[in-house]
Image (tube, grey):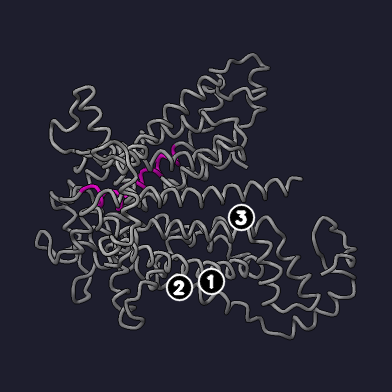
């Protein structure tokens, strides 16, 4: 019996009160998109996906396309650069762990708007060497997702004895590449999945860096389209938030399945 | 890999080195070879240097050096300009106000969820929703606020037609500084829930049982045990919320269409127009001032968090 748990009345009172207040903006946004002179209608939703209006809403689709490319490149960065390095630190350089952790969590303390001031000259240079393709922004986004990905991947690394696993595999004749890909990666899949999904959510929601470096991504497109057609921006907002919510729900559920498996 | 070779002392592990003769055979090979594994650290080190260290240094340095690369404090003098001081003041009270309200409301929600199973539907749903609002909302929260309480918003029109209550009798404050308060709370409260829940969940039921067994009351428990134990965590979360609001840009940029009432918006203005207030490198100076404030707050956060971690294991 938990002596300090709130009574059901208190629990429901706080839950309902805060829940309703937080539901208002989003319910209002939904109503706003459904509102029409003749009552509620789905016309505005249909209009957004109507091919006839593709030209008017092109910024949204271009932005979404760029954001998805960026999300993919950022996830590659996480899986092919961050994760292997973290495994290497755990296996060979445990003494570097604290320093690595400090570095990985540092971006939390550096406001994105400050980072932009310093990124502007660097991206001028990148523009000259790699061109101004949308994907180059993924380098900056990798830094933004570093703290989130560090936490989820490190939690997975701590949960498995990767040292013993890799030594066993090496003893049985596996090369380092095989060890990483076929022994360690499958054991870290939960952390890798969470890190990838969080990266996607961060990239789809990012505005600061893209807007100040004049790149077209989903969020900058929403701001642009909002000036001509606030309903389209509101519909896209609801869809993007719902999508991010589902991604995070999957992470939470995946953790739940994993926790149950470990405890049984 | 088959597991029938398993015969080591650690049966609980999936695999472990088999047989005593193998390590002896492997040892000379390890000694003879040079260890090149540090090379694997180089790519990430270069990446972090190029996209985190260099930009941060450049941002701060552009506030401290003039166009010819000579060290100067002239740019920083801009921070003493009355306009800039007002901006920093605005940012500070906005962050403080939303941090305090967000921390109190968020802590209440955490309290309401106390005792619910961590893997249950309520906790996972609230966690996911909090994560979305706290970390990925940005611009979209501004749109939701405009749709709800904008001048043509659903709630505004409802209040006006039903109760005759005009939200904007005194002007369209939602597009100015006061409008940022409700918008910021939409991400501050969820951030509090994410950061404070682990601390609250670490309260041991045994403490309450011991307290009640020894004749204490529930109110007494919170006064003498619960709140003192939670105080450092609460303070740490409050500091994090302050830093979060202070550095937030997207919501304000989408909501406040004109003017630069807070520091991040002032940086935008400085970046997009050549000279503001007749000064060069103003963006750098502002970035410098901002990073000093955030660094102080985050250092305090780390110190308080270390104290708070004592009760969480």
Q: Earlier in the sequence, mark 3 or mark 1?
A: 1
Q: Nearer the viewer, mark 2 or mark 1?
A: 1
**In the foreground, A250 or A55:** A55
Please report the bounds of the magenta region as a residue range: B235-256
Q: Chain of mark 2?
A: B
The residue wearing badge 1 is A81
Determine the residue positioned at 28% across, 59% down: B288
Proximity of marks 2 and 1: CB atoms separated by less than 8 Å: yes
Q: Tag 1, which secondary structure?
A: helix
Q: Nearer the viewer, residue B120 or A141?
A: B120
Name the residue rendered at 25%, 49% in the picture. Answer: A230
**Residue A103 visible in rendering:** yes
Tags 3 and 2 touching, CB below 8 Å: no
**Disc 3: which chain?**
A
Direction from residue B101 to residue A255 in the image, left or right: right
Question: Seen in the image, is A83 located left or right of residue B193?
Answer: right
Q: Is residue A63 magenta?
A: no
Decide which of A66, A198 is in the foreground and name it.
A66
**Position in image of residue A185 (x %, y %):** 65, 66
Where residue B47 is drawn, which disc sits there?
2
């Amino acid at each position: 019996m938990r002596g300090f748990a709130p009574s059901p009345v208190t629990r429901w009172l706080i839950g309902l009160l805060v829940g309703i207040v937080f539901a208002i903006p989003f319910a209002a946004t939904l109503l706003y998109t459904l509102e029409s002179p003749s009552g509620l209608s789905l016309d505005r939703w249909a209009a957004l996906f109507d091919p006839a209006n593709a030209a008017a809403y092109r910024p949204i689709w271009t932005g979404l396309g760029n954001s998805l490319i960026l999300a993919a490149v950022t996830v590659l960065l996480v899986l092919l650069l961050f994760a292997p390095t973290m495994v290497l630190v755990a296996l060979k350089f445990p003494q570097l762990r604290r320093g690595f952790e400090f570095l990985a969590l540092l971006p939390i303390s550096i406001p994105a708007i400050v980072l932009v001031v310093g990124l502007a000259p660097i991206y001028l240079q990148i523009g000259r060497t790699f061109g101004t393709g949308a994907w180059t922004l993924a380098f900056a986004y990798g830094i933004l997702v570093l703290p989130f990905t560090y936490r989820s991947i490190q939690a997975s690394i701590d949960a498995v004895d990767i040292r013993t696993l890799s030594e066993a595999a090496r003893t049985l004749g596996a090369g380092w590449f095989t060890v990483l890909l076929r022994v360690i990666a499958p054991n870290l899949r939960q952390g890798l999945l969470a890190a990838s999904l969080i990266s996607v959510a961060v990239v789809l929601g990012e505005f600061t860096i893209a807007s100040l470096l004049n790149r077209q991504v989903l969020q900058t497109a929403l701001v642009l389209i909002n000036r001509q057609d606030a309903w389209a921006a509101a519909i896209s907002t609801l869809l993007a938030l719902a999508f991010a919510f589902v991604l995070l729900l999957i992470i939470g559920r995946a953790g739940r399945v994993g926790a149950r498996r470990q405890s049984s | 890999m088959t597991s029938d070779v398993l015969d080591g002392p650690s049966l609980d592990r999936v695999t472990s080195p088999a047989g005593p003769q193998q390590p002896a055979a492997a040892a000379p090979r390890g000694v003879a070879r040079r260890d090149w594994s540090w090379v694997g650290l180089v790519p990430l080190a270069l990446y972090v240097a190029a996209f985190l260290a260099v930009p941060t240094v450049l941002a701060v340095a552009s506030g401290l050096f003039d166009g010819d690369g000579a060290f100067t404090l002239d740019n920083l003098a801009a921070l003493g300009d009355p306009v800039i001081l007002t901006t920093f003041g605005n940012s500070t009270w906005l962050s403080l106000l939303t941090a305090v309200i967000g921390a109190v409301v968020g802590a209440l929600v955490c309290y309401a969820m106390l005792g619910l199973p961590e893997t249950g539907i309520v906790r996972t749903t609230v966690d996911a929703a909090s994560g979305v609002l706290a970390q990925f909302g940005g611009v979209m929260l501004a749109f939701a606020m405009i749709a709800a309480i904008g001048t043509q918003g659903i709630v505004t029109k409802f209040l006006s037609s039903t109760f005759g209550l005009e939200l904007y009798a005194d002007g369209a404050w939602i597009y100015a500084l006061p409008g940022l308060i409700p918008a910021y709370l939409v991400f501050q409260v969820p951030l509090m829930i994410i950061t404070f829940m682990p601390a609250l969940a670490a309260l041991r039921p045994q403490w309450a049982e011991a307290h009640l067994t020894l004749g204490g009351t529930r109110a007494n428990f919170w006064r003498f045990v619960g709140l003192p134990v939670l105080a450092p965590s609460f303070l740490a979360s409050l500091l994090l919320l302050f830093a979060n609001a202070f550095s937030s840009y997207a919501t304000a940029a989408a909501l406040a269409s004109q003017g630069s009432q807070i520091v991040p918006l002032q940086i935008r203005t400085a970046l997009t127009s050549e000279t503001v207030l007749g000064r060069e490198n103003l963006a750098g100076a502002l970035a410098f001032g901002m990073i000093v404030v955030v660094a102080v707050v985050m250092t305090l956060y780390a110190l308080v968090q270390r104290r708070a971690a004592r009760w969480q294991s």
